[in-house]
Structure formats: C-alpha cells, structure tokens
Amino acid sequence: MPSRTMTPAMSDAFAYAIVRMVVAVIQVLPLDMGDHLCRGLALALSGPLAIRRRIMVDTLEKVYPTASPEQRRQLTLGMWHHLMLMVCEIAWAQRRLHLANWTDHIRLSGNQQILATSLSRRPSVLVSGHFGNFEIGSYSLGLMGLKTLAIARTLDNPHLHDWVDRFRSAKGQRLVDKNGCAPVVDQFMREGGALSLLADQHAGDKGLWVDFCGIPASCHKALALFSLTNEAPMLALYTRRVDGRPMQFESAMLEMVDPLADDQDERSTAACESVDSLTHWYNRQLERFIDLAPEQYWWLHRRWRTPPPRVAKRLEKARALSSNRDNQSQTDTQAA
C-alpha cells in the first residue's frame, strides 16, 4: 500500500515551488505596496506571532539596558520590517537592479579605496555582518566588476540552495561550503582574490571570545588568520537602507587595516598585531555599523551564547582592567 506521507524529495520540491511562487508575486509588486505589506507582516511577527520573542527580549535587555520597554518594542518592530523588506529587495534586485541603473539605488562611500584594494594583485578580506542588506551589498560589488569568494553553509533543501547560489553568483560572487573550504580559500587568496565574510557567526565554545555590544560572543579565528597569514588588508563594509526607503542604500567602507601598511595610525597598526587584536578590531567596526541603524541588525540572530566559566572570568577581568585604565585616563586629563 503506497505511503500517504511525502518523501523528503517531494517535500523539498513542494517547499521550493511555494517559495518561488511567493517570490514571483513579490517581484511584480510596486515598491510602495511591498513596503506596506512588509509593515503589516512586521506588526504580526512582533505581536501576535512573536517569533523568537524570548531571544530578542533577553538580547535587547542586555544590549540596551537603559531603553524603555516601548523603545525595545519599537526596535523589534523596526527589525522585522527591515527583514521582510530585505527579502523583497533580494527578489526585486534580480529584475530592477542592474548595470545601467544601480546608481539610482546605491550611494557609495569610500568606493575608490574599496576598488583600489580589492582589484590590486594583493588579496583582501571584506568583513560585514547581519546588518543592513548584506546580500544587496555583495550583489552590488559584482555589478562593479569585483569577483569575490564567500563561505556559506549548504542549505538543507537542494532546490533552494541551487536557486540562492544562482542569485549570489549571478554577478560574480563565488560560494564555497564552510566544511572543507580551507584549501579553496588558501588558493583563492594566493591568487589575490577578495574574500567576503559575515563576521558575526557564532564559533562555539572553542572560538575566540570577545565582548560584542557589551555581551560575550564567540568569534571564528579564521577571519583574522585569513588576513594576517596572507598579509591581506581587512575592510569593514556595510550596506544599509537609507531613511527606511525600499531599494535605496548606502554602501560604504567604514574603516580598513593593512598588516603591511607603515603609514596608518597607531590604533590600526595595533589591530594587526595578533588574531586577538584583529578580532577585537572588526567587532568594534560591527558595533559602529549597528549604531548607524540599530533596527537593521538581526537581533533574533543567536549571536550571543553563555561562555564557559573560565572564559567568563577572563572577560570580567579584562573589563575591570579596561575600566581602570579609562578612569585613570580621565583623572590624568582633568589634572592636566
């Protein structure tokens, strides 16, 4: 007797068909109608549906302890609106963002330095995070002719994975699975490529723990190692939506450090001294991203976990030393 349940292959194909139909509907929507739809979905997701509410409440209480409940509620609403609009923008980009009109949608800042660094014969490491519309950021770099390599997890649904891969690689971005990617990345860097990475992925208990937005977070050591071992400049990039308007972005380089530069300031030089210092550096840049538009960060992302006891003790000691140095510096300034 035939089974009445769907096989995994049938389930994957059905899910893929549903997603493609939803995307097809989104692609024909005017921008303003899509924005209104996203605002309605945001109200539902931050209210009655309350997806990942516990994670977001705990995170926002720790990151913004002085904010009122209403301010945190508005931030949650803004984040859901951003995420829904991000999905629409990714769907729209395939048909509405191209070589002839990208300047109507994207305002660049620091683009000369980005291109000069990324198109040189030296390798480079481009770091961003789950902030703004990072997918549009990668897509726009491809429109400018920059070929990048990104490390990503293979999606469980093979049809969706192939479709997402086609979008990401449409303008020149190459993807490699995070499992066993080291030889591919090493070869790419030796050839002078630009490695594009999301720097706020949880690295587990054995990662390098640093304070991110005042809360311990585990970071992958590989990001700093890619830069230091290949003597590659690291660029902190973001692409954020401007004034909440759909398909209107600012894409910018916030800061850059170069392990080989001898003309950068002492702070940037110190950032390149070790894996630890460079990891702290790019996390500070991510914090600066978030300060520009807090509602455009993925607060539902499980970025922060509980560190092992020994790590928590070390971080507390480091905070105390930093606080003492700051207090001493203020005292010396006042005395002077």
Image (cartoon, rainbow, N blue to C red):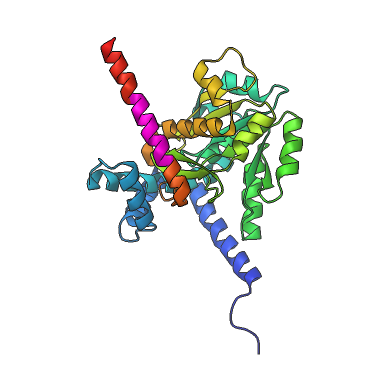
* Residue name at image x 42 percent, y 30 percent: 288
What segment carries the magenta color?
Answer: 315-326
Residue extending farthest to the bottom is 1
Does residue 283 appear to the left or right of 52 in the view shown? right
In x, y percent, where is residue 45? 36, 56
Q: Is residue 244 visible?
A: no
Residue extending farthest to the top is 336
Between 50 and 244, the one lying in front of the other is 50
Q: Is residue 230 magenta?
A: no
Residue 158 vs 303, above or below: the answer is below
In x, y percent, where is residue 198? 55, 40
Please tell me in which quadrant of the rendered image residue 194 appears. Answer: top right
Q: Is residue 323 magenta?
A: yes
In x, y percent, where is residue 273? 58, 26
* Residue name at image x 75 percent, y 42 percent: 183
Main secondary structure along the magenta-highlighted residues: helix
Q: Quadrant of the C terminus?
A: top left
Residue 110 vs 2, above or below: the answer is above
* Residue name at image x 56 percent, y 49 percent: 206
